[in-house]
Amino acid sequence: MSEPIPVPLCCMFTSASEDGEPLPAWVVQIVLVMSNDTMEEVAQKVSEHFVDQMFPKRDAGMVVTHEGKELPSNMTVEESKIEPKDNIYVTWDDYNFYANQ
């Protein structure tokens, strides 16, 4: 594995209201992650910009979606082939983002 490098990503976080209605991901944040960060670490870094600020905290895991595919939590940014400035979505693992579009 190569030396870790910073990777700026365009990130959105989406969630659902208490009654299950999708809440739109209308705010995009540029979040700096490292190429050796796992998707679990990426989700945590992204959530720091949204959870407890725009969305309530929940007792649930999170998933990262890139180009319509949920990425495994142990996959690194480098392994995922996510490029700088790519768009990613982070959501709760019990919320199917694409089913609610």
Image (tube, rainbow, N blue to C red):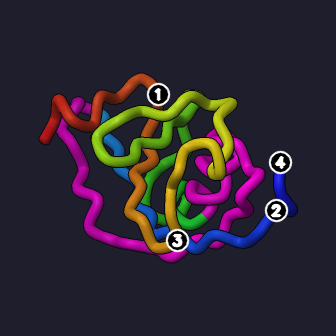
Q: Are marks 4 and 3 in contact (CB under 8 Å)?
A: no
Q: CA distance from mark 3 to mark 1?
A: 24 Å
Give the number of the disc on residue 93: 1
Residue at 83% x, 48% y is 1
Q: CA distance from mark 2 to mark 4?
A: 8 Å
State the SS at label 2: loop
Q: Are marks 1 and 4 in contact (CB under 8 Å)?
A: no
Residue beneath disc 4: 1
Residue beneath disc 3: 84
Give the number of the disc on residue 4: 2
Q: CA distance from mark 4 to mark 3?
A: 18 Å
Q: Nearer the viewer, residue 68 or 28?
A: 68
Give the number of the disc on residue 6: none
Q: Amino acid at mark 2?
A: Pro
Residue at 58% x, 74% y is 8
State the SS at label 3: loop
* 27 is within the stretch colored magenta: yes
x, y percent for residue 20 = 23, 31
